[in-house]
Image: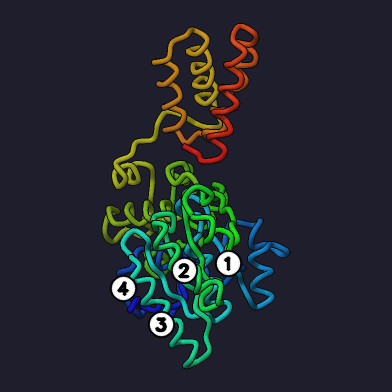
Amino acid sequence: MPDEHAQSDLFGYSDPGRSSGKGGAFQPLAERVRPRSIDELFGQEHLVAPGGPVRSYLEQGRIPSMIFWGPPGSGKTTLAEICAGSLNYRFEQLSATDAGVKDVRRVLEVAQKSRSIDGRQMLLFIDEIHRFNKAQQDTLLHAIEQGLIVLIGATTENPSFEVNRALLSRMQVYILNPLSEAEVQRVVERAIGNDPQLAAAGVEVRDMEFLLAYAAGDARKALNALEAALSLAPRGAVPVVIDRKLLEQALQHRAPAYDKGGEAHYDTVSAFIKSMRGSDPDAALFWMAKMIDGGEDPKFIARRMVIFASEDIGNADPYALTLAVSVFHAVELIGL
């Protein structure tokens, strides 16, 4: 039978009851520091701010089955656990990468027994739900329709393509956005201030800009990077200074000479445009790769291609603008 998970979340205070359970102090930092309530969650204001749909559901004391669609580290698992904890639902979790029909049926049996014993509703969270095939997804239909479970599925893929229509019609789909740099920074700062291990070490991040660029909106990635750097810091030093050199050593990732708001940004964009203007695809690909590696928003690059097709190519090839606009829409819809 799948383990029943205690309430825990991704981006803030750890649950005191959980820290003494499975994993304890050996849990990764991202597991130790999670908010316990919706008010502690950073990001996703369109869902959790006053008047937002998820907050409204919790205030009403009942939530529908939902799909959370968003990139890694945006808080999908966290938000599901917060929903379960806020409503005192029994929380069960499966990963679609290694669970099968038998696992789903076993959880549904547990849900039936739990309801008959104590009347508690079960929230079943399925990570990477898009990896379930049609037969596995169909196993859930009756349980959702009868109210046996509330299902929350997490996916990084467009559910319109990856989740079958019968299941999709029974669920609400909500998009979770990558966290902004300011939100990731707040996650890191709160972890430093509230995690006992980090607080005892007196951790001080000297190059927050590099850490945020590396994380690229993924809070878990930022916390894992911080923890990796901390493990390589000199023992006994207080405070423990996390600088760029230590981060690069821990991550084996050297910061590219690219600053999204500075001179290198505009020089690189200019080189990208001039390469296309000069009909040099190899150079254009090089400068585009440099921008992406430097953390540039892919939509910014796609917009520059639309502008180039309109202003530089124009009527010489009217199809160029159509193609560039299609590229932009594809990037906007599914990313890279």
Cα distance between the residues tagged 3 and 2: 14 Å
Cα distance between the residues tagged 2 and 1: 31 Å
Provide the secondary structure element on which disc 4 rests: loop
Mark 3 or mark 2: which is in front? 2
Residue matched to label 3: 110
10 Å crowding of disc 1: few (<14), some (14-19), many (20+): some
**Who's the residue at 50% across and 68% down the image?**
141
* On-image quarter of the N terminus: bottom left
Cα distance between the residues tagged 4 and 3: 24 Å
Residue matched to label 2: 140
Q: Are marks 4 and 3 in contact (CB under 8 Å)?
A: no
Return the disc, 4 or 3, that comes first in the chain's sequence.
4
Return the disc, 4 or 2, that comes first in the chain's sequence.
4
Q: Nearer the viewer, residue 313 or 182?
A: 313
Based on the displayed image, in which of its 4 quarters is residue 257 positioned?
top left
Q: Nearer the viewer, residue 71 or 96?
A: 96
Asked whether residue 149 appears in the rendered view, the answer is yes
